[in-house]
């Protein structure tokens, strides 16, 4: 390589190939992503654009560099297939016997956590009734889709109604940081996209689902150790205003204990930036079952309206098996 | 080494033309003086400012309430401001300055239009000032390593274009047609940065792409800047100075060629983290590229080893070589860390932890900045025709910087691994994990302190020499001016 143009060509070739790979192709593949339809049960378009205040909150999140300590990428290590009963039917003894047989007789299934303890061989009817309380819940964990389908058939034959639940698993999910892994769709309407790179603080991808209370967030921003004793987050007092109480206290004023209280005649109220930031934080949800990240929602999943997740009525999502979702 | 090789062979570029005689080194240095002094002094100042910001960010892990009432100095602004000072304020200008000097010296030609290069450097520094101010004011773009808002980015880009175009012209006008290894690296770096910076600027700040494609482009950009650009310029410097200062020939041109190709081919693909919520082929491709990046590390290590003839102690002989030797070791360690974390099992632990910033800082700081210190300590005395008053200060800077890097990187790395292992166990509450990293972070503050001290010494060394030079010039100019008046008075 003794010629300038040759060096130029080499570098041009290398950079152009990586440019095509990681600039052009991603733009063609995910830059043109459109809203998709959620799978299983109610088909909704996902994601929905965040409400206006939450979009302003994204700007507060960006300006103050929240992403340097908080990631928004939940990972999952895999998916398991759980067999759940939604209805025990009338012949409960037969159902329990079938469950037992499936759990012990075949290498294709292991008992799910909910089933492990109370289920003893030869249990009485009363015992089986207590096991079958609190439906729907998962009883078996299957290794393959075929085994799961066979088990569902066996259980349905006893008069119970069994269905397949797709449950994503992984340390992040076990920590309660989300219900499925993050996917590109979750960020479709955000700009800038800030997936973060570090977990100095917890992951926020699904924060709105686990902490829907706006007042908790306001108090936590003002004095993090008030809400979470072990927190290492710096306080964001500049998002709040200390002002004199005129006539009567503001309904927005933070309820602060003794030493943090602003003193008689004063109150701490959130500035617009704080309210916007909290609107954004509570709008962070990544819990819609999608074709490339399938899962079955637990029955209790109710969704506040101010999120980017579609409103999925809990009952319909739980009773409908995601037949069109690929098992992973 | 081409510089010490026999007279230049007949140029293939201008056949039949009269081979222009090479320019003497003092003349080359004189043409480089002003732009390089501006670039290096500016870089040293940004470095001091950056380490002040880094210290503020670090103290927040001791006292979260520290400066908490100030929006401008909140952690999420101070930390990127500090890193931008270091990257765009120090690394790139210092790298460009060293590149200009190497291109002029290796091409045995004067710098083209040094005045315009100086203007470019000023423009660049104004852009960085606007950018860092913007970040502190809350105008950060939100993309890691590309935080400077678009108005600042345009100034920086303009300054960069002026410098780069003139550097390419300098390369084009070289009198020594035989290319030395360093010139490949530098020439590639010269247009690498404008390309990636303009791509990132256009697609992320001007005509924003949608959704996750933004993050992918931002990752691509920062990997190309931190791994490839810093690698290219840093290695060019290493390949120039190690043979020159040890007085030995470069071991193998082919190993250098291998390192060059592997760096530009695989380095530019390594940006997408495994956790990224994007189609799976991207993180997989990146992991493969990061793993293969080890080839260039090995090629560089073998080449330097061969050049030194296996006597690593030779690197301690010259003060500049110490910095460069340290940088080389950091380059190898950082490269190995990156290659190891290409394995999914390792990455599962190290992702999202302090291990990642430790790796990045070891590369940007332990490798690149240290190599630049060594180069600047060699180049500036040549430019000014002055020696440092004592090499003690330079040696002190070396030891303080080396200790600083170690005290900074090792705790973060260890803390990151502990943090990552704990994150695998959902039973350990997250706040325990977060607090568990504090002792490590607090230990790294001592590294921050030492680095800040080292930067002050660097600035002091550099500014002292520059002031001495220009004072001597001013004095002689004054003397010349006044004596002239006297003689004219005396004449009648």
Image: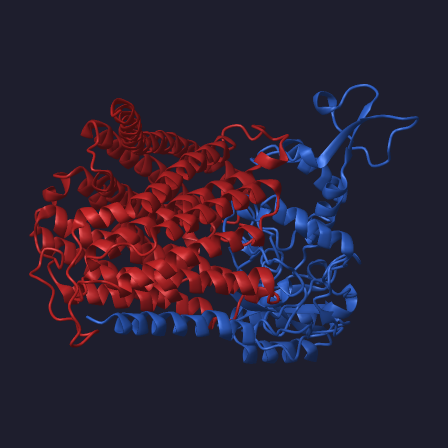
Left or right: A17 as drawn, with respect to A34: left
Looking at the rendering, which quadrant does residue A118 occupy? bottom right
Residue drawn at x 73%, y 65% is A48
Q: In the picture, which quadrant includes the N terminus of chain B? A: bottom left
Give the answer, above or below, for where A51 lies relative to A276: below
Residue drawn at x 28%, y 27% is B488
Between A104 and A214, the residue placed more toward the observer is A214
Tell me what hue chain B is rendered in: red
Position of residue B165 measured from the top left corner of the image (x, y, whole percent): 38, 61
Looking at the rendering, which quadrant does residue A239 occupy? top right
Between B228 and B61, the residue placed more toward the observer is B228
Give the answer, above or below, for where A268 lies relative to B76: above
Residue drawn at x 25%, y 22% is B490
Tell me what hue chain A is rendered in: blue
Residue farthest toward the front in the current orientation of the protein: B492
Is residue B272 in view? Answer: no
């Amino acid at each position: 390589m003794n010629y300038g143009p040759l060096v130029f060509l080499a570098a041009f070739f290398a950079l152009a190939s990586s440019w095509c790979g990681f600039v052009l192709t991603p733009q063609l593949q995910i830059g043109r992503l459109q809203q998709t339809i959620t799978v299983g049960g109610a088909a909704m378009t996902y994601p929905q654009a965040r409400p206006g205040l939450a979009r302003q909150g994204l700007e507060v999140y960006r300006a103050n560099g929240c992403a340097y300590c908080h990631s928004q990428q939940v990972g999952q290590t895999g998916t398991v297939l759980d067999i759940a009963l939604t209805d025990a039917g009338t012949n409960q003894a037969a159902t329990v016997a079938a469950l037992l047989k499936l759990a012990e007789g075949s290498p294709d299934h292991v008992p799910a956590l909910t089933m492990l303890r109370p289920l003893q061989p030869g249990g009485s009817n009363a015992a089986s009734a207590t096991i079958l309380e609190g439906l729907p819940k998962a009883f078996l964990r299957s290794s393959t889709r075929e085994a799961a389908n066979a088990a569902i058939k066996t259980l349905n034959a006893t008069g119970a109604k069994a269905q397949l639940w797709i449950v994503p698993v992984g340390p992040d999910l076990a920590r309660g940081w989300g219900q499925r892994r993050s996917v590109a769709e979750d960020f479709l309407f955000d700009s800038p996209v800030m997936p973060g790179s570090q977990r100095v603080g917890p992951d926020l991808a699904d924060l709105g689902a686990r902490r829907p209370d706006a007042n908790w967030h306001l108090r936590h921003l003002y004095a993090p150790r008030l809400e979470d004793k072990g927190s290492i987050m710096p306080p964001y007092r500049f998002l709040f205003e200390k002002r004199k109480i005129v006539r009567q206290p503001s309904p927005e004023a933070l309820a602060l204990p003794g030493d943090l209280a602003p003193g008689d005649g004063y109150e701490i109220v959130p500035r617009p930036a704080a309210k916007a930031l909290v609107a954004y934080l509570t709008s962070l949800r990544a819990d819609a079952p999608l074709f490339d990240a399938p899962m079955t929602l637990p029955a209790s999943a109710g969704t506040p309206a101010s999120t980017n997740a579609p409103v999925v009525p809990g009952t319909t999502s739980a009773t409908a098996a995601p037949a069109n979702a690929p098992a992973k | 080494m081409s510089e010490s090789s026999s007279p230049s062979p007949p140029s293939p570029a201008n056949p039949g033309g009269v081979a222009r005689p090479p320019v003497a080194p003092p003349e080359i240095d004189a043409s480089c003086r002003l732009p390089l002094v501006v670039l290096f002094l500016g870089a040293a100042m940004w470095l001091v400012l950056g380490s002040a910001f880094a210290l503020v960010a670090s103290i927040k892990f001791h006292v979260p309430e520290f400066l908490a009432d100030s929006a401008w100095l909140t952690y999420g602004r101070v930390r990127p401001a500090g890193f931008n000072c270091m990257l765009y304020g120090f690394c790139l200008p210092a790298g460009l300055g060293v590149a200009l000097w190497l291109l002029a010296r290796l091409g045995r030609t004067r710098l083209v239009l040094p005045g315009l290069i100086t203007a470019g450097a000023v423009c660049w520094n104004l852009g960085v000032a606007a950018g860092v101010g913007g970040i502190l004011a809350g105008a950060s773009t939100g993309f890691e390593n590309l935080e400077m808002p678009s108005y600042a980015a345009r100034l920086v880009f303009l300054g960069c274009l002026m410098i780069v175009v003139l550097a390419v012209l300098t390369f084009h006008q070289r009198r020594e047609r035989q290319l030395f290894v360093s010139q490949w690296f530098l020439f590639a770096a010269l247009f690498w940065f404008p390309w990636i910076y303009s791509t990132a600027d256009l697609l992320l700040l001007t005509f924003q792409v949608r959704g996750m494609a933004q993050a992918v482009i931002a990752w691509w950009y920062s990997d190309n800047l931190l791994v490839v650009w810093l690698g290219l310029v840093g290695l060019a410097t290493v390949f120039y100075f190690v043979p020159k200062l040890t007085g030995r020939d470069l071991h193998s041109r082919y190993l250098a060629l291998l390192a060059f190709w592997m760096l530009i081919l695989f380095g530019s693909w390594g940006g997408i983290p495994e956790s990224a919520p994007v189609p799976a082929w991207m993180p997989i491709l990146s992991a493969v590229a990061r793993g293969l990046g080890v080839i260039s590390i090995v090629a560089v290590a073998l080449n330097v080893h061969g050049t030194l003839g296996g006597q690593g102690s030779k690197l301690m002989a010259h003060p500049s070589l110490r910095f460069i030797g340290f940088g080389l070791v950091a380059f190898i360690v950082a490269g190995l860390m990156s290659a190891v974390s290409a394995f999914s099992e390792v990455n599962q632990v190290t992702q999202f932890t302090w291990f990642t910033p430790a790796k990045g800082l070891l590369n940007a700081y332990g490798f690149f900045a240290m190599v630049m210190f060594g180069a600047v300590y060699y180049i500036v005395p040549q430019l000014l025709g002055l020696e440092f008053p004592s090499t003690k200060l330079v040696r002190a800077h070396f030891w303080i910087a080396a200790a600083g890097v170690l005290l900074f990187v090792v705790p973060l790395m260890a803390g990151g691994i502990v943090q990552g292992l704990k994150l695998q166990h959902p039973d350990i509450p997250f706040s325990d994990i977060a607090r568990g990293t504090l002792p490590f972070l607090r230990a790294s503050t001592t590294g921050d302190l030492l680095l800040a001290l080292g930067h002050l010494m660097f600035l002091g060394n550099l500014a002292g020499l520059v002031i001495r030079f220009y004072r001597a010039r001013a004095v002689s100019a004054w003397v010349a001016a006044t004596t002239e008046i006297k003689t004219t008075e005396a004449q009648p």
